[in-house]
Image: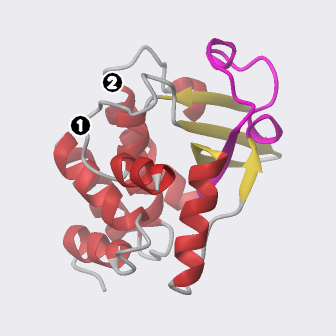
Amino acid sequence: MSIQRDEERSETFALGSSVYGGRPTFALVRDETGNEATITLYELLPTEQADARQRRLERRRQQSSKTHPFHEVIGENVEGAEDWTWDDWVAMKVRRLSGSRLRCLLHLFDEALRNTDIDPSLVTGTGSATVLIPEEPGVQLSLGFIGIKPLQRVDRMRALARGVARMSLEECYYWHAKCRSPNSPSGEKALRTLLTHHK
């Protein structure tokens, strides 16, 4: 009962009042091999909460993201990781982007990280990097990653990125809840329709 209540609280529009006391709840992982760069966004969750979400998705016959132990994804010596205990936490992949989808989202990184002390070039530059990010920019970036993934046309990708960048914090939390909740299976499609007029 307590786990379900915590999950519901985290999926409301708590407007930046992270239920985890300011702990980073998202991570961006940049990998570069040859000329190809990929950035993967992970949501960081307590194991019990991630398991409860997966069970809810399975009951509704929806696809769930694979979870990985925190240290398997984040690795050692990531700035800020040492401030928290991660033993009972997992990383749940939101989406991995590369190519034109990633290029169309680059300005969203600047927008989302503007009010943090994180330099966007840590992720958008070159080489490999892992950056832990707070809840608010993580919620905004997750909308971009989720919304852009199936799009094929660059004009629609750019429209989606611009639309997410213009959203208020309250709107971001609302759409994040719709897109990630097992109770709203058509949330992602509704977001894309709203921002790109594409079904």
Query: What percent of the width, then of the height, locates residue 126?
Result: 68, 31
Q: Nearer the viewer, residue 111 or 117?
A: 117
Please tell me whether mark 2 sits on a helix, a strand or a loop: loop
Identify whether 44 is placed above or below 155: above
- Distance from Cα at disc 2 to Cα at disc 1: 17 Å
In the picture shown, does residue 96 fall above or below 191?
above
Question: Magenta segment, which residues?
Answer: 70-94
Q: Is residue 96 above or below residue 85?
A: below
**Amino acid type of the residue tagged 2 in the rendering:** Arg
Task: Tell me the residue at 31%/21% (across/down).
Answer: 115
For the point 27% across and 49% down, the residue is: 173
The residue wearing badge 2 is 114
Question: Is residue 98 shown to the viewer in this render?
Answer: no
* Residue 71 located within the stretch drawn in magenta: yes
Q: Which mark is residue 23?
A: none
Which residue lies under the disc numbered 1? 15
